[in-house]
């Protein structure tokens, strides 16, 4: 178990609760970019930090600086901290779920802050177990009250001015849902130190066998399949449970589109290729996305290219590249269960989200 805790953080006009982690292995304290933006915090400048990693590696990074106000849940204690902004603090950290251990802790008249507060009351983007603050060695020592209790299970509970927190091994061994940390790192940014992949822990979709993944995709397909008012079948996309934010890919889609148009013009096939998209629109397979909607809702653009088969009934057809990605970003394929079954289920759905040969115009599914 890692030392996580729930605190209140105050912005200029609002207060919110967040989950944070106490990590004395970090010399500085951090707040996530998401929370800084949500609370409209005003930075007090920038600081360039050289992060020294295990093995002698060093990484220089520039961070925005803030002064934040934190308090415990009942507002009996508050303090001001100087922190730096970090895009991602760490991977989501699950709470203690072993009911036997929880009851033993309660028998000791200890209320863990991270268990007494409902995680749904905390700020999060996509996962209730997200961590949006880190208290490092610059403040951690001053926040502990000195009360320490060793539990029979081997866990250690420590009291802070924000409430009780827990650390140690649960004795149940490692599971795919646990976040284990190690100082054996390579050339990584500070946020990468908390990445599951960098620690050799793979997502459930990777560690599962192929048959288990296929069964999960089948189950998702059956549960999400429905028919709309027009009698069309719809199925939701099977996102991985834990994934970073997907970029819009607009720039790479534009670049490839221009290249695609030039290639088609040389072969005098541009109109034939465009007619395929017009046919899809007329059949309500796709629909145009208005500029106002693009400004209001962030989408994802898929590059496409023509494939020619001279001896086929369909001489030319669009093929979409779900593996396309900008630098330092993931592709659409990286966010889904990747199986042959999934390819069959989502082929039409994926293809319908791309822009057509007319630069600046794009299409989407009618609904879903």
Image (cartoon, helix red, strand yellow):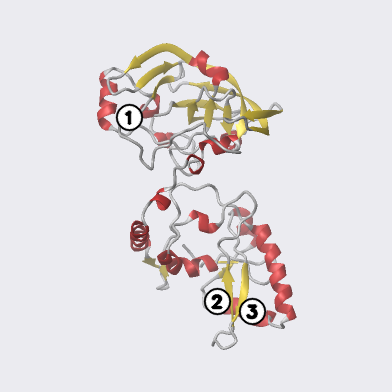
Q: Position of residue 175 (x, y in %)?
A: 35, 40
- Secondary structure under the numbered disc 3 in the rendered image: helix
Q: Position of residue 49 (x, y in %)?
A: 67, 28
Name the disc covering residue 42, or none. Answer: none
In front: 41, or 347? 347
Nearer the N terminus, badge 3 or badge 2? 3
Q: Residue at x 58, y 28 (%)?
A: 30
Q: Nearer the viewer, mark 3 or mark 2?
A: 3
Res. 136 image quadrant: top right
Residue under label 3, please give it. Answer: 273
Label 1 to label 3, Cα distance in Å? 60 Å
**Other residues around mark 3 within 10 Å, as few (<14) / some (14–19) / many (≥20):** many
Q: Residue at x 30, y 19 (%)?
A: 151
In front: 334, or 117? 334
Q: Position of residue 26 (x, y in %)?
A: 56, 25
Q: Nearer the viewer, mark 2 or mark 1?
A: 1
Residue 278 appears in view: no
Q: Is residue 127 above or below residue 337?
A: above
Residue under label 2, please give it. Answer: 280
Nearer the N terminus, badge 2 or badge 1? 1
Circles 2 and 1 in contact, beta carbons < 8 Å: no
Q: Residue at x 64, y 78 (%)?
A: 274
């Amino acid at each position: 178990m890692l030392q996580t805790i729930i605190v209140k953080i105050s912005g200029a006009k609002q207060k919110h609760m967040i989950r944070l982690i106490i990590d004395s292995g970090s010399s500085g304290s951090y707040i996530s970019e998401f929370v800084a933006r949500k609370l409209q915090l005003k930075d007090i400048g920038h600081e360039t930090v050289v992060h020294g990693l295990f093995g002698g590696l060093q990484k220089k990074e520039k961070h925005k600086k803030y002064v934040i106000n934190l308090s415990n849940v009942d507002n009996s204690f508050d303090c001001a901290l100087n922190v730096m902004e970090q895009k991602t603090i760490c991977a989501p950290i699950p709470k203690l779920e072993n009911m036997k251990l929880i009851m033993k802790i309660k028998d000791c008249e200890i209320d863990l802050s991270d268990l007494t507060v409902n995680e749904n009351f905390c700020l999060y983007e996509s996962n209730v177990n997200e961590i949006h603050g880190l208290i490092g060695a610059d403040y951690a020592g001053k926040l502990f009250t000195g009360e320490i209790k060793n539990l029979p299970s081997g866990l250690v509970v420590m009291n802070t001015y924000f409430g009780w927190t827990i650390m140690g091994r649960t004795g149940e061994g490692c599971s795919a849902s646990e976040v284990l940390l190690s100082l054996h790192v390579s050339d990584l940014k500070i946020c990468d130190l908390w990445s599951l992949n960098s620690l050799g822990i793979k997502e459930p979709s990777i560690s599962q066998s192929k048959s288990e993944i296929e069964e999960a995709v089948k189950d998702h397909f059956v549960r999400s399949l429905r028919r709309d008012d027009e009698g069309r079948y719809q199925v939701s996309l099977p996102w991985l449970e834990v994934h970073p934010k997907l970029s819009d890919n607009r720039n790479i889609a534009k670049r490839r589109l221009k290249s695609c148009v030039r290639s088609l013009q040389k072969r005098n096939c541009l109109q034939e290729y465009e007619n395929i998209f017009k046919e899809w629109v007329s059949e309500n397979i796709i629909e145009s996305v208005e500029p106002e909607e693009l400004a209001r809702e962030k989408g994802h653009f898929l590059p496409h290219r023509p494939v020619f088969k001279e001896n086929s009934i369909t001489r030319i057809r669009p093929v979409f590249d779900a593996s396309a990605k900008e630098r330092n970003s993931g592709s659409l394929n990286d966010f889904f269960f990747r199986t042959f079954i999934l390819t069959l289920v989502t082929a039409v759905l994926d293809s319908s989200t791309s822009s057509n040969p007319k630069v600046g115009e794009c299409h989407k599914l009618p609904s879903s």
